[in-house]
Amino acid sequence: MKPDEIRDLLRFYFITDDGVADFPVLDQVRLAVGSGATMVQYRNKSFGLDAYEEVEAVCRFCRESGVPFVVNDDVLLAKAVGADGVHVGQDDALPRLARRVMGPPAIIGVSVSTMAELERTDLAFCDYIGTGPTFETGTKVDAKPAHGLAGLRDIVNRSPVPAVAIGGIGPVNAVDCFAHGAAGVAVISCITRSGDPAEAAAAMAAACGVSARGG
Ligand code: TZP
Ligand code: MG
């Protein structure tokens, strides 16, 4: 995918939350997409046997909505459900394997927390990097220390592919991330764990300069 195309898709990147019992994942995605999210990632760190059906339902909804859908961690699952792409971490499948399995038009993203990780990642097979945590986050228990806006800018400046910032981002500091070179912001808890998720999603859309989807 061309850098300009992927930059637009990264703008308001919503990631599902498997940690809020009373907010089903498909409802999270409906809200985010309806509010204007430009890309969706299914992230589930406690995959049960029923996850496959949930992923398929989210994938179908995103396809009907015209929003690109990627699966976190699991290349095989991404391929099986017909996702648009996959997002891998430093300890998951190598980007070149992900590219081989998913095919040339697929979106391949990789997590990069530090400059050292950036340097050892084979970015020739990636469309974008997810970089963070930019700010402190309680959502990822094993997150590395936050690199802050200066760290974000350093990584953006060295990355040959567009970067989406992640970690502790909400409507206010999203604007700072854009000002420091991020093509987009990836968010979980600012929407899913907000007292008013609809209002939070609308505020994110406004911060990202995207419009709600009608219908
Ligand atoms: N990777 C780095 S921070 C993070 C991930 C998956 C969690 C982001 O969640 P939140 O709730 O938007 O801080
Ligand atoms: Mg991973």
Image: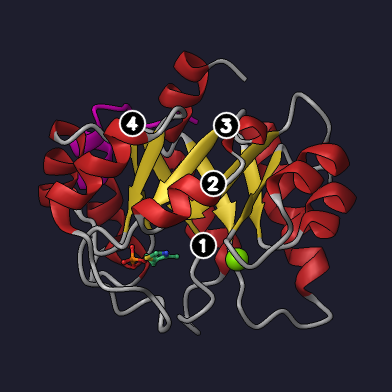
Where is the N terminus found, in terms of image quarters?
top right
Q: Secondary structure at mark 3?
A: loop
Q: Earlier in the sequence, mark 1 or mark 2?
A: 1
- Type of the residue with mark 2: Val
Q: Secondary structure at mark 2?
A: strand
The image position of residue 42, as x and y in percent, is 61, 58
| Lateral position of residue 178 relative to residue 48, left or right | left
Proximity of marks 3 and 4: CB atoms separated by less than 8 Å: no
Proximity of marks 1 and 4: CB atoms separated by less than 8 Å: no
Closer mark to the observer between disc 3 and disc 4:
3
Closer mark to the observer between disc 3 and disc 1:
3
| Residue 68 lies in the magenta-colored region | no
The image position of residue 94, as x and y in percent, is 71, 53
| Lateral position of residue 48 relative to residue 114, left or right | right
Alpha carbon distance from label 1 to label 4: 20 Å
- Name which quarter of the figure residue 61 lies in: top right
Closest to the observer, 183 or 24 = 183
Q: Earlier in the sequence, mark 3 or mark 1?
A: 1
| Lateral position of residue 208 relative to residue 17, left or right | left
Q: Identify the magenta region.
A: 203-215
Q: Is residue 63 above or below residue 49?
A: above
- Type of the residue with mark 3: Asp
Which residue is identified by label 2? Answer: 40
Q: Secondary structure at mark 1?
A: loop
Which residue is identified by label 3? Answer: 127
Proximity of marks 1 and 2: CB atoms separated by less than 8 Å: yes
Alpha carbon distance from label 1 to label 2: 8 Å
